[in-house]
Image (tube, rainbow, N blue to C red):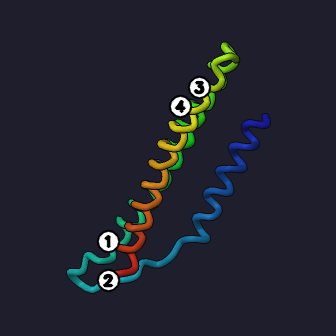
Amino acid sequence: MKKITALSSALLVTFYTLAAFAQETVAAAPGSNSYDAQMMAALGAGIAIGVGALGGALAQGRVAAAALEGIARNPGADAKIRTPMILGLALIESLVLYALLIAYFLQGKVGGH
């Protein structure tokens, strides 16, 4: 019953906010595709940071879980496991920062020409 209540509450909030964000479309100049390009750039920026953050979070979780499992099995290997783990986490985080950078550059395309 708790799952049904939580799911129905989430759906209600999701669909209730759609009406709040509904807007009339602005007519672009005939033959102009700039509005479509701006929408696609904004969509691409959102997808880039969303997928980057999701992938980075999943990867960092797996790295930490594997490292902790290795340390739990062999506590003497703590020093040998920790350094590669931190290096791996830093490389994963750099990919997330690249996604943020791409999203930032795509957002720059939205406002400018």
Of label 4 and label 1, which has the lower sequence position?
Answer: 1
**Residue at 45% over, 48% down:** 95
Q: Nearer the viewer, mark 1 or mark 3?
A: 3
Residues 58 and 85: in front is: 85
| Disc 2 to disc 3, C-alpha distance | 58 Å
- Could you tell me if the residues under marks 2 and 1 are in contact, i.e. CB atoms within 8 Å? yes
Circle 2 Cα neighbour tier, 10 Å, few/some/many (<14 / 14–19 / ≥20): few
- Could you tell me if the residues under marks 3 and 4 are in contact, i.e. CB atoms within 8 Å? yes
Q: Nearer the viewer, mark 2 or mark 4?
A: 4
Q: Nearer the viewer, mark 4 or mark 1?
A: 4
Q: Quadrant of the N terminus?
A: top right
**Residue at 42% over, 78% down:** 25
**Residue at 52% over, 49% down:** 53
Q: Nearer the viewer, mark 2 or mark 1?
A: 1
Amino acid marked by disc 3: Ile
Of label 1 and label 3, which has the lower sequence position?
Answer: 1
| Disc 2 to disc 4, C-alpha distance | 53 Å
Circle 1 Cα neighbour tier, 10 Å, few/some/many (<14 / 14–19 / ≥20): few
Amino acid marked by disc 1: Asp
- Could you tell me if the residues under marks 2 and 4 are in contact, i.e. CB atoms within 8 Å? no
Of label 2 and label 1, which has the lower sequence position?
Answer: 2
Q: Which residue is mark 3?
A: 81
Q: Quadrant of the C terminus?
A: bottom left
Q: Which residue is mark 4?
A: 84
Q: Secondary structure at mark 1?
A: helix
Q: Which residue is mark 2?
A: 28
Q: Which residue is mark 1?
A: 36
Amino acid marked by disc 2: Ala
Q: Secondary structure at mark 3?
A: helix
